[in-house]
Image (spheres, rainbow, N blue to C red):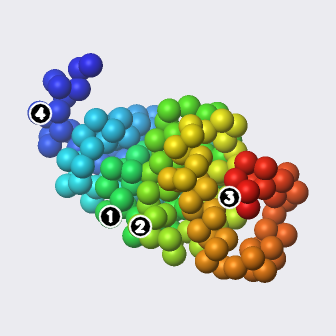
Amino acid sequence: ACFQHVKPCIADFMPILGTNLNPEFISVCNNATWAIGEISIQMGIEMQPYIPMVLHQLVEIINRPNTPKTLLENTAITTGRLGYICPQEVAPMLQQFIRPWCTSLRNIRDNKEKDSAFRGICTMISVNPSGVIQDFIFFCDAVASWINPKDDLRDIDMFCKILHGFKNQVGDENWRRFSDQFPLPLKERLAAFYGV
């Protein structure tokens, strides 16, 4: 409701938020990360000029060892949101963060933040499918972590499209060999919910 008052100052705020993406100061970094994610949802495509100010730091944070769980989750959500609104800018870096992104979000409960982040990752995968191939099992596991995704996230547009697209691309035999590596609960869940 108050974003109209914040929006005129975004050009001043974003460089400051980018500077505060320093994981040495956990709470400041966490707040800056969260704010960037919230601002991105409000700004939409107008966020594009600010992506270079923040993306590399977010990728560094999500890949940093011993990063606190809440900072990892906020970083994953914000990265997903940036990828949802500006996929052309974020998707080229997908391979650099997809694995920790998936492991960070697989254990959080279904909510609107997780929803927007997953919409972003799916949009980025559609722009840069090769960015997920190496870590596709992590994506499968993250998708299976959903208890009740919204229909448009689960079905044709997002999860099913990507899972079936990957399966069709590699062929039934290669998919069988690939999915035989899955833990049984993951394999069963993907078969039951997504038909793969």
Classify residue 54 as left or right of residue 112: left
Residue 140: which numbered mark, if any? Answer: 3
Whether the residues at callouts 3 and 4 have beta carbons within 8 Å, the answer is no
Q: Which residue is denoted by mark 2 in the rendering? A: 127
Q: Secondary structure at mark 3?
A: helix
| Residue 75 in sight | no
Mark in front: 2 vs 4: 2
Where, quadrant-wise, is the N terminus in this rendering?
top left
**Cα distance between the residues tagged 4 and 1:** 25 Å
The one nearer the camera, 182 or 58, is 182
Whether the residues at callouts 2 and 1 have beta carbons within 8 Å, the answer is yes
**Cα distance between the residues tagged 2 and 1:** 7 Å
Q: Secondary structure at mark 1?
A: helix
Give the farthest residue toward the top: 1
Residue at 54% across, 45% down: 153
| Residue 173 in sight | yes
Which is more N-terminal, label 1 or label 4?
4
